Image (cartoon, rainbow, N blue to C red):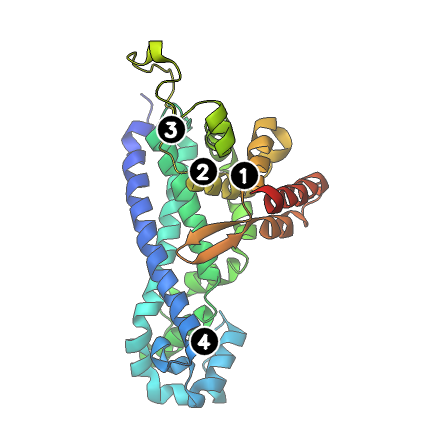
Amino acid sequence: MSRGVMQPSQQKLAEKLTILNDRGIGMLTRVYNIKKQGQVWKACGDPKAKPSYLVDKNLESAVKFIVRKFPAVETRNNNLAQLQKEKSEILKNLALYYFTFVDVMEFKDHVCELLNTIDACQVFFDITVNFDLTKNYLDLVVTYTTLMIILSRIEERKAIIGLYNYAHEMTHGASDREYPRLGQMIVDYENPLKKMMEEFVPHGKSLSDALISLQMVYPRRNLSADQWRNAQLLSLISAPSTMLNPAQSDTMPCEYLSLDAMEKWIVFGFILCHAALNSDAAALSLWKLALQSSTCLCLFRDEVFHIHKAAEDLFVNIRGYNKRINDIRECKEQALSHA
């Protein structure tokens, strides 16, 4: 065995996928709670729901200056004089928020590293063959995407990160060591899906292969109640002579796989590896079927994603995607009429 060959068995890919998926749900919960705190404050004016430094009239000009200059750091400004008095309290009270964002960045690093390893190992994905590995891979892609979308919806993220770093600069004479990368990540992911479409270009083959393996599973699960009745799929006595025979199949039937989960895989997956929609008929068929099935997806708890508008906004700036935009509009009409 040559030293340069990367062996999938040595990378513990399944274990890493499991750990990162669990970690991702924890990160989603923390980021969601920060976002909700901001919404409660806006709706109710409850000062306890938001860090006091973001609503303190004395710090209003400093916060506006920090957000306007973000992620640049300019400590020599009259607007920042008030921060000197509050710097220790700011560090103490904003640390939980700040380091949640740092943890998001570290989670992102680990996900990107694992996705690169999977590509280097040329892992085979097929939901009907290696079910757990493929499911966990697609779940991680969706969890990562969801996390970056919800992060971009936190209106106060620049103010929180910037305020903490300015207080750190005034206290220790230097920016926090995580700040340069964290600030750049916040700027880069202002439009998370657009950024991730670029990021997933190298992962396109692995992701599209995993998604296309749903071509038999998803259409079979996505049938109307009438179609299930007519095919007698739920009837135990439709074929009495074979009732006692064990079911045999060369593939995993995936009957317990959530329809909602599959729709998220397909919608987000083919947004990220959209080139497959132009080159593979099975990919396009899956994509259109998912777009016809619903108008929005649940991201996390009460956070939702409006499929058709988001997809159209992303594809409208890509040359040669007029057919895909027409597909999205047609599928939206179908979804509104029949979903």
Q: Amino acid at mark 2?
A: Met
Percent of width and height locating residue 12: 28, 34
Give the CA distance from mark 2 to mark 3.
11 Å
Q: Is residue 323 left or right of residue 148?
A: right
Query: Looking at the picture, which amino acid does disc 3 mark?
Result: Cys
Mark 3 touches mark 4? (CB < 8 Å): no
Q: Which mark is residue 262?
A: 2
**Measured Cα–Cα span from mark 3 to mark 4:** 43 Å
Local crowd size for mark 2, using a 10 Å CA cut-off: few (<14), some (14–19), many (≥20)? many
Q: Is residue 223 visible?
A: no
Q: Secondary structure at mark 1?
A: helix
The secondary structure type at the circle numbered 2 is helix
Q: Position of residue 85 (x, y in %)?
A: 34, 89
Can you identify the residue that label 1 sits on? 290
Q: Secondary structure at mark 3?
A: loop
Query: Residue at label 3?
Result: 254
Q: Marks 3 and 1, Cα distance to the nearest angstrom?
A: 17 Å
Residue at image point 61% right, 52% down:
309
Residue 43's label in the rendered image is: 4
Q: Amino acid at mark 1?
A: Ala
User: Which residue is found at the position 30% from the left and 50% from the top?
Assistant: 23
330 on left or right of 179 = right
Residue 95, percent from left and from top = 31, 71
Q: Earlier in the sequence, mark 2 or mark 3?
A: 3
Amino acid type, mark 4? Ala
Mark 1–mark 2 contact, CB under 8 Å? yes
Classify 10 Å Cα crowding around label 3: few (below 14), some (14-19), many (20 and above). some
